Amino acid sequence: MKKLIYDAILFFKFLRIEHLKKDIGFIDEAYRNSGKKLNLSGFENDSTLDSRVTYLPGHFSQKLAMLKTIFFVLKSRRKTNRLILLHISRENIILAFVFGFISNKKTYIKSDMNIDGFLRNDNSFWAKNKIIDPIIKAIAVRYIDKISVETQFGKELVDVFFKGKIKTFYLPNSSNLSPINECDISKKKDSILYVGRLGCPHKNVELILDALTEIKNCPFHFDFVGPISDDFKRVIDNFNKNNQLDVEFHGPVYDEMKLRILYTRAKYLLLSSKSEGFPLVFPEALASGCTIISSDVYAAKDVVLSSQFIFSSKQQLCSILKSLPTTDSESLNIKSLAKYQYFERGKLIKNFSEEIIHEWHLQ
């Protein structure tokens, strides 16, 4: 029998270089730490090429892309016993079927779950079809070995969707940041930090700016970090004309040391998204001892200290900002730093390795 080349192959059709710094990089790191060989694969997608990735020529949206993908997956079964895919979709369930039908090999899916879309779609990952759905679910149960979900609530939904017939486990996103020392908590400034794209509709930063225009006196300095769209530059200009608070727009900060300094000096992280999976800013904030204030996205319930720091309207955010403690905030920051233990990268890699690498590859 020909020796297999890889312990697992991860395929993600949207793969771009930035994903190697996020969840795909996390899986790659876990395999390398375990001495296992993982192949990363995806379409070129006009991205900067990386030597760690096996590229399918062209873009995932081009004609015949699905046929190229199926052919790649068919060939992959001769190189590995395990396939890793991202997202629960009909397409990925079909790929799991293609991979496993001939060889009886299983697939693991890492699900970055859009819970809002799932609930809007009548508790389904796709537009419901009474004829196709039972077939797709039966294929999933037969050929998908495990699914990880990045929020606790999302995991419950997946369990219900597949009626507990596929093993699921909780795998939130992690941060590369090492936790600060508890003694550094006392050095924090009266600062509130926002990190994310400015002008992206689902990030909803306008809600924060609208709230700030209604707050006349606030002891906090506000730092906004992230790429600024051209349209949003006009929003910032209008805001600055009437703003009386201490607010600074930094634009994108790619220097990791400078970004860490902003996190370390901030007492609070503020997130205003309309919907999110499990944003990387959450573990980054906890590692930096920042108390998280968040809109009512599902991942917020996994990271906030209490419901008093979750808002769903401008009025609620105003109320939170007006009542935030300054001199008595140190205990909150210490509790936030302690909460990072549940999202620490090394611990999550260990959990992933136990669920997938050690258990999977010993079967």
Image (spheres, helix red, strand yellow):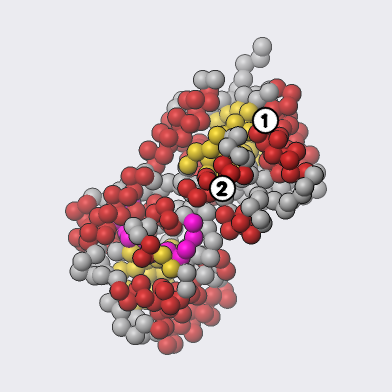
Residue at 79% x, 39% y is: 67
Q: In this view, does 70 lie to the left or right of 165?
A: right
The answer to which quarter of the image holds residue 44 is top right
Neighbour tally class for label 2: few under 14, some 14-19, many 20 plus, Cα within 10 Å: some
Residue 52 in view: no
Estimate the x, y position of residue 99 in percent, counting from the top left.
70, 30
**Residue type pointed to by label 2:** Leu
Q: Name the N-terminal-most of marks 1 and 2.
A: 1
In the rendered image, the residue lying farthest to the top is 1
Estimate the x, y position of residue 324 in percent, counting from the top left.
29, 71
Q: Where does label 2 land, which residue?
A: 157
Estimate the x, y position of residue 49 in percent, counting from the top left.
60, 44
Neighbour tally class for label 1: few under 14, some 14-19, many 20 plus, Cα within 10 Å: some
Find out whether residue 293 is within the magenta segment. yes
Q: Is residue 315 left or right of residue 263?
A: right
User: Which labelled disc corresponds to residue 142?
Assistant: 1
> Which quarter of the figure is the C terminus placed in?
top right
Give the Cα distance between marks 1 and 2.
Answer: 19 Å
Q: Between residue 105 and residue 177, name the one nearer to us.
A: 105
> Which quarter of the figure is the N terminus placed in?
top right
**Residue type pointed to by label 1:** Arg
Range of the magenta residues?
287-298
Q: Is residue 238 left or right of residue 256?
A: right
